């Protein structure tokens, strides 16, 4: 559910602005917005406060230190141990900033971490460079070692374009002519840079070879001067040894970073938290509008928090600070911050929805609807009690493997719901590892989808119609909330098209003339043409979206058939071990089909066919000022 927000404007004497900001941080409920986002304050002619003097210097110093500490923490490995007694921050913010940024143990540790990272990055870049040259000749390494001791001969590596077979043959012919046959040419494999070859020829012919053999199509490979040695072979040998040395250096850097992390990670984290708490009020001061004697702040807070925050201001400032509250207008919806509040079972699906963006304020939070639809669709396709148990165990394993990881916790919650619906549908279909349900004596299924494919198809298409229709209803509600009456009319017309097509089909199926259904269809198309204009050409896609739900049946049947094959393989196998092995293989295949394809298809049906009918992307997440 999208929490109802109120616009709040706060005004008071300019001398109290810093205290008001501290009060807002203590309240932890107000999202301060830029004055430009508030049309009323933007038109007031008031100017934002500019930080000058000591405040500006403090802001610059804090931002610089935050950047350095974040870079260090992002690259430091996990700490093996910690010794917090190494460093203690002063109680005051000014003293903490001075201690962190001045020469001393903390700054030395931070600078050392930065230096190690720079050296490690340089070593990694050189390893890549060395590797690029080395890989061109790796295939020739044994040959070069043998040729190195051939006196009076020079070895040169060359490349030419991958498609340049003619250039290679031309080079071979010219090399033979210039050296009077005293040469050898070894062609290597194709690389993305081109084809590599190794040419060996008398040293006395070097100048002629370079002038007449190596042209614009044939490029001798020149390694950087710092890698060159006396001979081509010794240069290659140095490249190999240099790569080993660089890897040793990087291992040393990693060990040093581990030491820094073990001693200083918690101190870095504590300093970062203090600096960010210090930086928040300074940034907030830049959001104030000032006159000669007063200030204004604009922002947002949950409607339920308005009374509490106003009471805090009244107690602390005794009426000297005033708050004004307003409901947002539709034109303000895109800038209104979003706060979602859902039951615990729905919260994991908020993460799925917000992969794209949070919903726009004033529209509909789809997470509760997705929490019902997605697991139910998935379970309809899998529909097997045995596979549901395996799925639930995998969810348990994920949450157990990463106990403190929020993403793993949400994934586990989604998997549990999918497993529950798979078990519910599995009981309804009478399926447990295929036909094992009946084999162990659980009785006849309530609905055997193997024997009733037509009814199954009609049921899933009807569900698709319901799903897409619900999307149109949500679209009508969104249009109403945004006062977009054209949108309401178009979505109502789309809903009319769906209902009239189903009505016409039902009348035809029962043997009656579908006249009324056709008339209703014509009226719906007329309304959409009047209000939607060119959007009418998209109307056939509604029916396509409904019929795409037929894939539910196809994917479910595919999993069922493979599971049934597992049972047949077990009974027809020559021995117990062979039967178990064959059955396990078929069940693994069935489970793969039943997990991967339904997950993709259920997500597509929800995020394209359903959400595509009404979802509006939001831009701002609710981020209140708060301590800690």
Image (tube, rainbow, N blue to C red):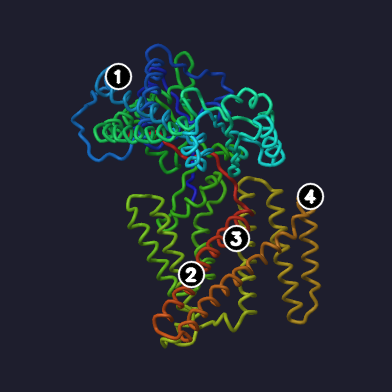
Q: Secondary structure at mark 1?
A: helix
User: Taking 494 as reference, is 200 above or below it?
Assistant: above
Residue 603 place in picture, x, y as percent: 55, 58
Residue 595 visible within the image: yes
Question: Which numbered disc, 4 or 2, marks the residue closer to the eye?
Answer: 2
Discs 2/3, front: 2
Give me the C-alpha separation between circle 2 and circle 3.
21 Å
Q: Nearer the viewer, residue 218 or 92?
A: 218
- Assess disc 4: are there few (<14), some (14-19) or many (≥20) residues with their C-alpha within 10 Å of its C-alpha: few
Decide which of tag 1 and tag 4 comes sooner along the chain.
1
Q: Please name the residue that numbered disc 2 is placed on.
A: 591
The mark nearer the N terminus, 2 or 3, is 2
The residue under the point 46% across, 34% down is 149
Q: Is residue 555 above or below residue 613?
A: below
List the residue tagged with mark 4: 534
Image quadrant holding the C terminus, namely top left
Q: Earlier in the sequence, mark 4 or mark 3?
A: 4
Quadrant hosting residue 304:
top left
Question: Which mark identifies residue 605?
Answer: 3
Q: CA distance from mark 4 to mark 2?
A: 45 Å
Which badge, 4 or 2, comes first in the chain's sequence? Answer: 4
Say which residue label 1 marks: 94
């Amino acid at each position: 559910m999208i929490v109802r927000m109120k616009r709040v404007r706060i005004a008071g004497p300019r001398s109290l602005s810093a205290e008001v900001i501290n009060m807002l941080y203590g309240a932890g409920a107000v999202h301060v917005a830029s004055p430009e986002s508030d049309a009323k304050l933007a038109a007031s002619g008031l100017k934002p406060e500019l930080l000058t003097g000591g405040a500006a210097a403090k802001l610059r110093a804090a931002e610089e230190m935050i950047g350095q500490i974040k870079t260090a923490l992002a690259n430091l490995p996990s700490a093996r141990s910690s010794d917090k007694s190494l460093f203690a921050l002063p109680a005051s913010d000014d003293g903490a900033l001075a201690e962190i940024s001045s020469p001393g143990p903390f700054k030395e540790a931070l600078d050392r971490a930065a230096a190690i990272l720079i050296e490690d990055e340089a070593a990694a870049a050189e390893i890549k460079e060395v590797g690029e040259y080395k890989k061109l000749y790796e295939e020739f390494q044994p040959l070069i070692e043998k040729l190195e001791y051939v006196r009076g001969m020079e070895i040169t590596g060359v490349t030419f374009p991958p498609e340049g077979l003619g250039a290679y043959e031309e080079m071979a012919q010219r090399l033979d002519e210039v050296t009077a046959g005293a040469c050898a040419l070894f062609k290597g494999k194709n690389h993305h840079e081109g084809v590599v070859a190794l040419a060996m020829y008398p040293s006395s012919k070097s100048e002629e070879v370079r002038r007449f053999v190596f042209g614009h199509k044939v490029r001798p490979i020149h390694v950087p001067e710092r890698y060159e040695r006396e001979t081509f072979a010794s240069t290659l040998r140095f490249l190999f040894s240099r790569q080993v040395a660089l890897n040793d250096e990087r291992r040393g850097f990693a060990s040093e970073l581990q030491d820094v992390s073990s001693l200083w990670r918690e101190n870095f984290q504590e300093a970062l938290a203090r600096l960010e708490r210090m930086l928040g009020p300074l940034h907030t001061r830049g959001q104030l509008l000032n006159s000669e004697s007063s200030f204004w702040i604009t922002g947002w807070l949950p409607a339920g928090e308005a009374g509490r925050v106003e009471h805090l201001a009244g107690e602390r400032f005794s009426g000297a600070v005033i708050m004004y509250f307003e409901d947002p207008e539709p034109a303000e919806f895109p800038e209104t911050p979003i706060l979602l509040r859902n039951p615990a079972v729905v919260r994991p699906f908020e993460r799925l929805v917000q992969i794209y963006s949070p919903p726009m304020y004033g529209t509909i939070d789809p997470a509760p609807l997705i929490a019902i639809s997605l697991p139910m669709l998935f379970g309809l396709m899998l529909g097997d009690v045995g596979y549901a148990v395996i799925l639930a165990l995998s969810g348990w394993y994920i949450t157990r493997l990463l106990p403190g990881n929020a993403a793993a916790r949400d994934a586990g919650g989604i998997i549990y719901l999918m497993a529950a619906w798979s078990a519910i549908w599995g009981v309804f279909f009478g399926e447990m590892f295929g036909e094992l349900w009946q084999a162990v004596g659980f009785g006849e299924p309530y609905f055997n989808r193997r024997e009733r494919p037509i009814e199954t198809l009609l049921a899933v298409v009807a569900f698709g119609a319901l799903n897409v229709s619900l999307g149109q209803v949500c679209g009508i509600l969104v249009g109403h909330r945004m006062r977009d009456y054209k949108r309401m009319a178009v979505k109502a017309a789309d809903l009319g098209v769906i209902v009239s097509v189903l009505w016409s089909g039902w009348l035809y199926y029962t043997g009656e003339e579908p006249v009324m259904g056709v008339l209703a269809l014509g009226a719906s198309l007329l309304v959409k043409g009047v209000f939607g204009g060119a959007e009418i050409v998209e109307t056939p896609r509604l029916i396509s979206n409904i019929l795409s739900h037929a894939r539910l049946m196809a994917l479910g049947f595919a999993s069922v058939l493979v599971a049934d094959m597992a049972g047949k393989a077990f009974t027809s196998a020559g021995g117990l071990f062979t039967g178990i092995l064959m059955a396990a293989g078929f069940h693994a295949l069935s489970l793969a089909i039943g997990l991967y394809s339904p997950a993709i298809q259920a997500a597509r049906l929800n995020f394209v066919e359903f959400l595509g009918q009404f979802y509006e992307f939001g831009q701002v997440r609710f981020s209140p000022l708060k301590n800690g």
